[in-house]
Every structure is written in structure tokens, then in C-alpha cells.
Amino acid sequence: MKPYFFYARVIESLDLPPVERHACFADLHAEALRPYLDRVRALTAEEAQCPVNVGDDSRTVAQIVGHIAEWDRFSMLGAMDILLGGRHPRTATDLTGYIRLDGQVIDFETVDEFNAYQAEQHSAWAWDDLQALALDTASSLYALFTHPDLLHAARLERTESFEKRLDNGYLIDRIGMGWDLWLMVIEHLAVDHVDELGL
């Protein structure tokens, strides 16, 4: 998806009532998710080990896929916070409370620290395992946000509001942290890693 069109649709959706905004975000998420899942399914182990060669990024395609999967996992923890009635979901304002697959809880100071940690972790994973994790987390996270009984508009509206600047520089004066969490998930697929994955 071209960033200009993505951000135009996001900005337009912010003026909609919550239920309509939820439908718009669901459409955006589906549009970004389909090509990502298709690409991850199609990657061979050999292709996954190739460097992405985008800018100064030295990670492999597999490490980018692992990076997305781990942000999806972290976002699922934030989604769980919302489902449990929390108003400040994980990842919205800090990077504490990340839970590894072995159950260990880790706090991170910065996005760069989290990303470097995940790149190192996934450098040793077998592609089949990483591919399965990525497909499962991306699909599950989409289901959490779009199932009518889970992260529906009313739940997202109950989260604390704050000011947010989009990656394109647009300032949102007031957005609920639940909406922000979903927006970060969609933006990650629709804009942030399109070049690295050839989407």
C-alpha cells in the first residue's frame, strides 16, 4: 500500500464515529494483511536468509518477519490488557511487560533495544518455525481486532486518550490507546516493511 493513500485513509477515518472507524480500520488491516501473509507463505528457507538490502538495514528477510511477529505478539499482550479492562495497554506508551515464548518477562527501554534483541533471537531460528509463528500471530491479532465480541469499537473507546504523531508527521490531537495500538499494527504491515518484504 502506498504511504500517501494509507495515511489519507487513516486521517479520514479519525473523523468517523467509533463503529464506522472500526470498520475502516478493519478494512485497512485486511488490505495490509493479505499480501503479507501471502509473501510469508511463499518464502523459501533460502529466500528468508537473504539480506533485505534496504537502506542501512542489515537484517535478513527472516529477521524482518520475526521482527513483525514479535511486535504482533507484544501487541497481542496489549490487546489482552484491553480485554481485561485496562486503559493503558502495553506498547502504547512504553515497552514493559514483553513475555517471551518461554514465559520470561522482559522490559525494554527503547524500540531500538527491542528490535536488536529480536534480530539476535531470530537469527538462530529455523525458517519453518519462524514462518509458522509469523502466520499465526498476524492472523490471530487480526481476529482479535475484528471479532465482534473482542476488540470492538466500544472497548477501544474506553482506553486512555493521548496525543499521537503518525510516521508521516500528522498530529492526532486525541486518540484512544486502543485505537493507537491497532493503528501501529496496521502501519507496521502497510507501510513500515513493504520495501524489505517486496510487498
Image (cartoon, rainbow, N blue to C red):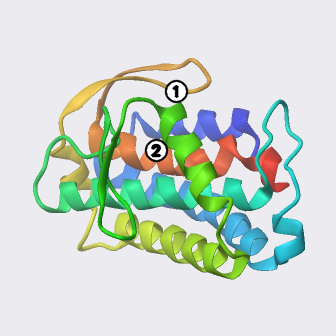
Is disc 2 in contact with disc 1, using a CB cutoff of under 8 Å? yes
Q: Give the class, few, some or many, for how many residues have Cα within 10 Å of label 2's Cα (few <14, many ≥20).
A: some
Query: What is the x, y in percent for residue 180?
Result: 38, 40
Amino acid type at image mark 2: Leu
The residue carrying mark 2 is: 183
Residue 1 is tagged as none
The residue carrying mark 1 is: 166
Query: In the image as oriented, which residue stretches furthest toward the left?
Result: 85
Please state if 185 lies on the left or on the right of 85 as rendered. right
Amino acid type at image mark 1: Leu
Please state if 31 lies on the left or on the right of 82 as rendered. right
Using the rendered view, name the quadrant where residue 169 is placed.
top right
Query: What is the x, y in percent for residue 48?
Result: 81, 66
Residue appearing at x 78%, y 37% in the figure? 57
Q: Give the class, few, some or many, for how many residues have Cα within 10 Å of label 1's Cα (few <14, many ≥20).
A: some
Residue 108's place in the image compared with 23, above or below, is above
Say which of 41 and 97 sits in front. 97
